[in-house]
Amino acid sequence: MVVNTTSIIVAIKGANDLEEDGYIIQIGNGASVETVRNLAAEKLHLVGPTADIVLEDMEGNPLNEIDKIRSQKVVYLNPKDTIKTVIPGPTKLPYIGNLYEMMPDMNAAFLRFFEKYGPVVDVNIIGNRVIATCDPEVAELFVKENEYFTKKIKAALKEIKLFAGQGLFTTDTSDPDWKLAHKLLMPAFSPRAIKVYQKEMGIIAQDTIRIFEQYKPDEKVDILHWTTNLTFETIGKIGFGYEFGLLEKREAPPHPFIEAMAYCLKQSIARFLQAQFIKSLPLEMNRRYDREVKLMHTIVDEVIKERKQSKDANDIEKDLLGFMLNARDEHHQGLSDENIRDQVVTFLIAGHDTTANTLAWFLYEISRQPDIEAKILQEIANVGITHTDLPCSEQISKLKYIHMCLKETLRMHPPVRALGKYCQQDCIIPGGYKIEAGTSVSVQLYGLHMNPKVYPDPYRFDPERWTPEEEQKRSKAAWLPFSTGPRACIGMAFALQEAKTVIAMLLNRFKFCYDGPPVKYDPKQPTTKPVDLFMTIHDRTDFPESSINPEAYKPKESTGLAKKMPKLSQSIEMATLKLPPITFLYGTQTGTSQDYASVLSNQARQFGFKNITLTDMDKWKVLKAGRYEGPTGVNEDRELVVVCTATYNGMPPDNAEKFDKFLDKSDTQGNEKILHGLQYAVFGIGNKNWRTYQHFPIKVDSRLDDLGADRFFISGKGDTDGDIDSDFNEWSAHFWSHTLSHYGLAISKDTSIVPSSSVNNEATQAAVVHYVSPKDTEKWELGFNNRNGTHNAIVIENKELQQGDSGRSTRDIRIDVSKLNPVGDNDLLYLPGDHLEVMPENDPDIVEAVALGFGMILDSVFEIDQSSIVGLSPRSLAATIKGTCTIRNALTCYADLLSPPSRRILGYFAAQLHKIAPETAKVFDSLTMPDVNNKDQYPEFTKKYRTLLDLQRGFPQVQKIEIGQFMAAVGVMQPRRYSIASSPHLFPKEAHLAVGVVDDVVNGKHYPGLASSFLAHQVPGESKAVLRANFKSSKGVFEMPPDAETPIIMISAGTGIAPFRGFLQERAYQHKHASGPVGECLVFFGCRREDQDRIYGDEFDEYVKEGVISGLHVAYSRQIPPSARKYVQHQVLANANEIWRMMVPLDKSKKPAVVYICGSGAMSRDVRTTFRSMAISFGAAKDEEEADKFIQKLIQSRQYNEDVWG
């Protein structure tokens, strides 16, 4: 392929010296405006989102077309925020900087600074400059390990490094010691490993209880002292087989190692704040510091020596020390004795101090919150944990509310108060602040966690902030007590399991009381320690009875019968076959792609592949590495990557945006081989009625090839407007046939290569469902409130738009959306052209009928055991419903009851019914795939049985299926998107929808549309008229021109008029408020009859009178007498001259009109055919091929825009 590239200089607007401030980028054949924007932002080190960056020429004119960009020598980037080289902050004094303002409490000082100067501040402490933030958006950039920010040991950590050496916490990310240790030690903290430590954690908690039993109720106990002893013993014994003897008796003396560590940690802050030369003076504090460091190292060296000489020297699974001594990487490289010593010291610091602080703060907080304490006690009782019996890991994992309380404790009292990073390349962060290479940056965790914009009323202890619904509203970087990414705390799971174990057992035995003044932390300590936290300890007398059966939380032996793996027809054993690594990537909006990728990965496992990865596209390891680094030879085990991805309006799914940017590397010279050696195949999902059908999957397939990967198998296409499961089954069968043949695996009749058939092999798995007793009032309340999201919008008006006896219904629905998260600019909730995504609900009568048929009690409350959903479809109810829920809510708000039963559901039901209803199972089996004559009976079957209710009535045997099987088989409903039919300037708190109500009649039976019927039945003023909704931005896809002077041409039919009503309201607003001229509006609309379904007709006629609409052309398909201009494309053709004059004005001073088309896919195709004829007739193209290219050019420059549906 010939790659023609264009060289362009890019610079930030306002740059004076292009030699100094400009950069050259190369753009290739397929580059888009977005490609240029991203490449330029990367070159100019603009970190963060790029969507708001405007590309301009030298005169400041926006560049919105790729051809115009190619014609420029220089392109300027105009970012959203003005570039600032000076970052706000307090005035610095010579030498000491801001030391006086920051002492004695740096946390309090930073809170003052953030309040006064904003979320990013520049401070200096005795020559150490730090850019600090409390903003999650900036924090997320700082904590990432990338080309801009990394961890380098500076400031106070340099002092800790003097005794922690090359430990994980005190070593640069780029240091080979850190990379090796991190790689080797990660498995020691895996979920499997953590479970092994559970018993010892419980024993040490019991040792602590025996100590506390020696205190009288009126004795004040130093809680931090004992939580420190507890956590020291835990990490010492579990980690290194070393007992400090701190819990042997109440008067146990402090261990010399602990005294030494405490002294050195406290000195680290003092040494950082003092003048550096003081550390070299012959002072006693310096001499003691050196003695204590030597003592710690000597003790640890002796522990390591003893282990190496013991019989357990080679036991890698004995404990963490055994792992350090014996673990090796792929090059057989292990940790040196000196590095092991440093890691032991590091884990002793991190493994005791932070957890000890958290436990102490936790007990303090709940002593002041009796309601919260009561909920905690009830949860402990329900799980069945006592102080006399050692809890199992399954019980600890069920302590959900305690987990929420711990997260809130860590928010209010983060053990480490700052995350320090290092800027290794000049960059510009959100807010426009320029940070130079070599600058230290910091996320101030206390400021971040107390940011009132993120956490309202931040000083209130509120565990409800940590419900899944609340957490989803916040940035993932809004809570960072364990940091995140590669530098995240390796022992987080260990610490949380230890804390939950200790809390549950202590609170079962004791009540902890505090009656003093509010407890403060010690700012002189490197971690957040409570000062003078003395509590009294009392026997627990108010421990509640369990409101459920605690046995439900204890581990059960599996009773399922494992199916044997079918033998291959060849005599080759799987263990002897050398199969390559295989990776399944998915990009999804609704879960379908993830489901298909999961099915393929399960099949791969059945066929004998061992090294299998299943992950979303943005988490592909190659994105981080920047290139494929595996084997490349023809006879080597080259990795095979299978991509299953959807597309929306031609754009990548949310979890494939980084992958999409990676693909754009093909536009840059030098990247033609970065995926050399990789093999791939793609299965795409889309809707054929959309112009952008398969747009992104095609891009993936093409660009992977451009980047040097080898296409292993032809791409597949699944059409959601048709039988997509059939499309997937057919492609999968051919794919596996090719794959197994390629690797020498024969196919036997017992080994199905068709996914819908292999479903029967896995469908014996059912979700484990626990019913909740009404006595557990908290869980019952949560269950009744679990409605698949929060009701956040209210229907305030609902009226009919059609007139006369049309026999159809279109509703004008006005919704109060003031509580939704905005997606608009300049404080607007939304922009014209945006969508409102509505989550529908099933009709109560249908819900009741399904429930009665399956023998379900609607108002019973259940909970799905999350460990039982592994391997189930991500689209299933079981995989989607989190927490407790009522049957009514599950069937009303989650279950897809009105879609045709999928092949997967039928296959699942068949597997469940083979023993109890074999005839029905046989019928269902025949529907999962075509028969031996390649005849597919499924399409005809779903014409008769269109819904789950039809299936239930036609085959009563399915009602024998149990609740767990039902939850595993039935899919979850998907939200519906509607174009917003209003302007935010005229209706700032409302969104209007034009909803065509679907009511299909088949054999005299009505089949209502799920979402449209749900919306149509909303009665304003009733408590039920509430919705679960979200805005979905159409920015860059279907948005009005930024310049009000630009003319627009709007073409639609039926409810496709909706966004144009919003456009026209916006233009009416611009006529009244714009400072300059406002462009013409030409409207084409198609409906059946003027007296029936010309919706919004009066409003549009009024816009004509006011001059907002310059031309209104309506086509009536069923008017009497009939007109030649029957459909909207006929009106377009009849007015082609006027349209062309606006699109390609002869007067170059006039702006070309932008065309918008909204409606069904069939209508949009007919309109495009008309525009193709116009291009030929007006000389812009010689033939249809050239006309297509002409229209494609208009699309790329956003002069021709479509929003279509099936």
Image: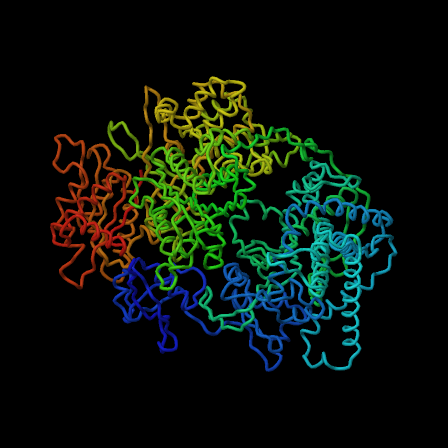
Colouring method of the image = rainbow
Q: Is residue 915 left or right of residue 54?
A: right
Measured as percent of width and height from the top left, residue 710 is found at: 39, 51
- Residue furthest out toward the front: 571
Name which quarter of the figure residue 846 lies in: top left
- Taking the image as shown, residue 383 lies to the left or right of residue 946, namely right
Quarter holding the N terminus?
A: bottom left
Can you say which quadrant of the picture contains the C terminus?
Answer: top left
Q: Which residue is drawn at 50% across and 45% down?
A: 579
| Residue 71 visible somewhere in the drawing | yes
Front position in the image: 845 or 862 = 862
Judge by depth and name the residue closer to the eye, 407 or 428: 428
- Against 920, is 482 above or below? below
Give left or right: position of 1029 versus 1147: right
Whether 720 is drawn above or below 327: the answer is: above
* Residue 822 percent coordinates (x, y): 42, 51
- Number of numbered discs on residues: 0
Rendering coords of residue 226 (x, y %): 79, 55
Q: Quadrant of residue 288?
A: bottom right
Q: Quick check: 1103 above or below 50?
A: above
- Could you tell me residue 911's position as x and y percent? 51, 25
Can residue 1022 be seen? Answer: no
Q: Which of 406 and 155 is in front in this view?
A: 155
